[in-house]
Image (spheres, helix red, strand yellow):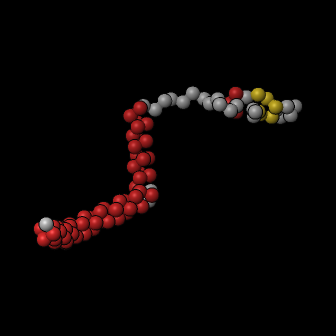
Amino acid sequence: MHFGVARPATGQMEKSNAYRIGTSPARPRLPAKKVIGMFLRFKALRLIHDELGQDMIEYTLLVAFVALASAAIYISAGKQIHGIWSQANSTLVTANAAGS
């Protein structure tokens, strides 16, 4: 597909390289430092204005809270479970000694 410029006298289309797709006048290239700086600035602004990361942080804090609560319950319940196993062990040892 190509775009042309109409001639006023004949009404026919004139082929012009300036309007063809894929061609453009020569542009000066930007220095790499400037391109990288623009890219980092764009990423930083996008990160500041983006709220998708907020959900991830909230879920991470929730998982950390559940892990700490589970550890606290495990530690406090561990002492009680140790007491139950110690009592069951002494009962079994006494029953074994009486049965022999």
Q: Is residue 2 left or right of residue 28?
A: right
Residue at 25 percent of width and 69 percent of height: 73
Depth order, front residue of 44/82: 82
55 or 31, nearer to the observer? 55
Foreground pick, 57 / 51: 57
> Which x, y percent locates residue 71?
25, 64
**Residue 38: where, in percent of width, then height?**
42, 42
Residue found at x 41% / y 52%: 47
Name the image quarter holding residue 79: bottom left
Q: Is residue 78 visible?
A: yes
Q: Position of residue 78 (x, y in %)?
A: 20, 67
Vertical position of residue 12 compared to residue 69: above or below? above
In the image, residue 98 above or below residue 2 = below
From the viewer's perspective, tell me whether residue 29 is left or right of residue 14.
left
What is the tally of numbered marks visible in this picture? 0
- Residue placed furthest toward the front: 100
Q: Can residue 54 be seen at all in this image of the molecule?
A: no
Image quarter of the C terminus: bottom left
The reply, left or right, for residue 95 in relation to residue 55 is left
Report whether 64 appears left or right of 85.
right
Q: Quadrant of the N terminus?
A: top right
Q: Which residue is nearer to you in this view: 82 or 59? A: 82
| Image position of 68 with respect to 34: above or below | below
Q: Residue at 43% x, 42% y: name it.
A: 39
Q: Position of residue 81 (x, y in %)?
A: 21, 69
Residue 66 sits in quarter: bottom left
| Residue at point 86%, 34% (across, down) | 11
